[in-house]
Amino acid sequence: MKVLAIAAMAAAAASTPAAGTEIAGTFDIALHLVPETRPANDTRARMTFTKTFHGALAGTSDGEMLTAGLPQQGAAGYVALERFDGTLAGRRGTFVLQHSGTMLRGRESLLVVVSPGSGTGELAGIAGTMRIDTKGGGHRYTFDYELPPLQR
């Protein structure tokens, strides 16, 4: 398994994409709790969600999220995978965003990255990170990404 991970990292480094670009925009989200039977003291939950992105990243995504903790008390964590389908700066395709977030005593930490190897169509080879801001209401994103030149 370690050899596979090293080979994947070497392959990713060998296919260096073009210089990075930063874009920003907004998105709408709808969350849906997946009903499950759990013991009373089990804080885990499963949700699905859909998003609509606006701006240079335009399209929709759907995802699955696992959470645990007590967010109303400022302590929780989540992981999620979401598949975006649409356009990025005029290029059409899909890719997966991988989320890992925590909140402790109200302090939040969130890492959202493009899952390596998940890009398709004109977004094949995409790499990047996304920041999400919900302060002041609404949902805003800043997306730092790299794309290889289109193969014609």
Image (spheres, rainbow, N blue to C red):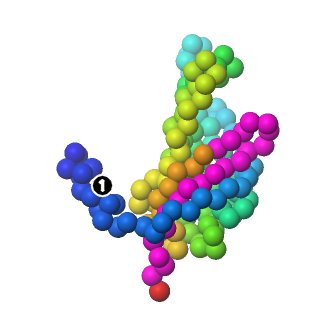
Q: Position of residue 91 (x, y in %)?
A: 59, 73
Q: Residue at x 48, y 66 (%)?
A: 19
In the figure, is residue 148 to the left or right of 57?
left
Q: Which residues are magenta?
A: 132-151
In the figure, is residue 132 to the left or right of 30?
left
Q: Which residue matches tag 1?
A: 9
Q: Is residue 148 above or below residue 30?
A: below
* SS of the residue under disc 1: helix
Q: Position of residue 79 (x, y in %)?
A: 52, 37
Please state which amino acid type lies under the numbered disc 1: Met
| Label 1 environment density (alpha carbons within 10 Å; few <14, some 14–19, many ≥20) | few
Q: Which quadrant would residue 148 be assigned to in this image?
A: bottom left
Q: Position of residue 44 (x, y in %)?
A: 56, 25
Query: From this viewpoint, is residue 45 visible?
Result: no
Q: Position of residue 10 (x, y in %)?
A: 27, 58
Q: Residue farthest to the bottom? A: 152
> Which residue is more in the foreground, 33 or 54?
54
Query: Number of marks in the image?
Result: 1
Asked if the stretch drawn in magenta spans residue 42, the answer is no
In the figure, is residue 56 to the left or right of 38?
right
Q: Residue at x 73, y 45 (%)?
A: 139
Q: Is residue 146 above or below residue 132?
A: below
Query: From this viewpoint, is residue 51 visible?
Result: yes
Q: Residue at x 61, y 18 (%)?
A: 105
Q: Which quadrant would residue 17 be assigned to in this image?
A: bottom left
> Which residue is more in the foreground, 7 or 131?
131
Asked if the stretch drawn in magenta spans residue 143, the answer is yes
Q: Residue at x 48, y 79 (%)?
A: 150
